[in-house]
Image (cartoon, rainbow, N blue to C red):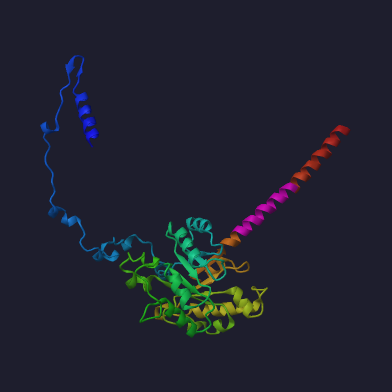
Amino acid sequence: MASLANTTAGAVAGARKISNGKPIPFISSKSLSFPSFRPSISSLKPLIPTQFSSLSPLQCSPNPSPSTSPPSLKSRLRNGETLYGIFLLSFSPTLAEIVAFSGYDFVVIDMEHGPGGIHESLQMLRAVATTNTPAIIRLPESSAVWAKKALDLGPQGIMFPMIDSPKDARKAVSYCHFPPNGIRGSAHTVVRASNYGINEGYLSNYKEDLLIMCQVETVDGVKKVEEIAAVEGVDCIQMGPLDLSASLGYLWDPGHKKVREMLRTAEKEVLKSDRKDGGAFLAGFAMPHDPPEALGKRGYHMVSGAVDVGLFRNAAVEDVRKFKISLNADSDDSDDDKDSDEKYWSE
């Protein structure tokens, strides 16, 4: 400490040495006048939280204005719009993001036939959220566990496969609602559906915004489709033409006359239901023999026209085909050139 003091004194003395024969005036800190600022502890008390436990996320969080949110799928359907969507089977966030920027009214994240689960579905939801594109999650099976985990992610809609009876439909609805109206497990204070607890109005609004869809895709389901559509809480009936054809024994021929007849029967039963009295909207998936425009003309309210995997497959196959054709065309052209050259020289 003594050596440090001596070093400091030397530095001060050096600063006072003369320059060009004249001494440089040394200014002592004592000769400077600064306004004193000595905050008291009492003045800082409002800045010091005394009870951290009182700072709950719901009390100090911002409240987003509902007017800034785009209209929900349910509200658009009630306004008479016909919505066009796509199934996402690849679980590629990049393809999902491209699809979202393309302008589809909705996407269906397909856990029934796609390779992804809950974690992958979360990444898909985040990919489409940048454009506010509504997402529906199709469950791998109709169960309370799958419904709970999917709903906690916060999709706008949920689709239950293989609903064959009103009893099945009532169970599906119960999986979506908290007690006493249903059996959904509650973790609304921390899950993504409620913005991790930040959305104070989640419990009040979740039923209004959630689109509950039941798939009717078997002979038994079609026979009871009118009763299924009338179940309270069922918002939409999604027809499944491929499984319906399999149920009728025409797995390899979904365009068979009997399949088309049964599909038309189911469509009419759903469309004639009065939605004001608990009826459901009609949703369907286009097929090569039944394009999206045809579904729209028959009164479908939601039309899914493609699958991301199918679109990419078709584009890839066509890309290869065009290149192969170009090679053959080049080969033919070179033969023509050779013939013309030979002809020219032979003359």
Question: Observer-nearest residue: 257 or 221?
Answer: 221
Which x, y percent locates residue 117?
51, 67
Residue in the picture at 57% in, 84% down: 220
> In this orientation, does residue 253 appear?
yes
Residue that appears at 12% across and 37% down? 34
Using the image as rendered, state which of residue 216 and residue 128 is in the foreground. Answer: 128
Q: How many marks?
A: 0
Q: Is 11 left, or right, of 174 in this rendering?
A: left
What residue occupies the far top of the structure in this picture?
21
318 sits left or right of 266 in the view: right
**Vertical side of 259 occupied by 123: above or below:** above
Image quarter hosting the N terminus = top left
Residue 229 or residue 233, whichever sits in front: 233
Residues 56 and 224: in front is 56
In-image side of 39 versus 208 (left or right): left
Q: Residue furthest right?
A: 346
Task: Name which residue lies at 46% across and 70% down.
Answer: 150
Q: Is residue 230 shown to the viewer in this render?
A: no
Task: From the image, give the main secondary structure of the stretch colored magenta.
Answer: helix
Location of residue 320 with respect to 35 vertically, above or below: below
Give the quarter of the figure containing the C terminus. top right
Q: Which residues are magenta?
A: 312-327
Q: Which quarter of the figure has residue 112? A: bottom right
> In x, y percent, where is residue 155?
43, 67
Q: Position of residue 85 (x, y in %)?
A: 51, 64
Q: Residue 114: where, in percent of width, then height?
A: 56, 67
> Residue placed at 62% from the left, 56% from the top?
315
Q: Outermost residue toward the front?
A: 2
Residue 121 is a magenta residue: no
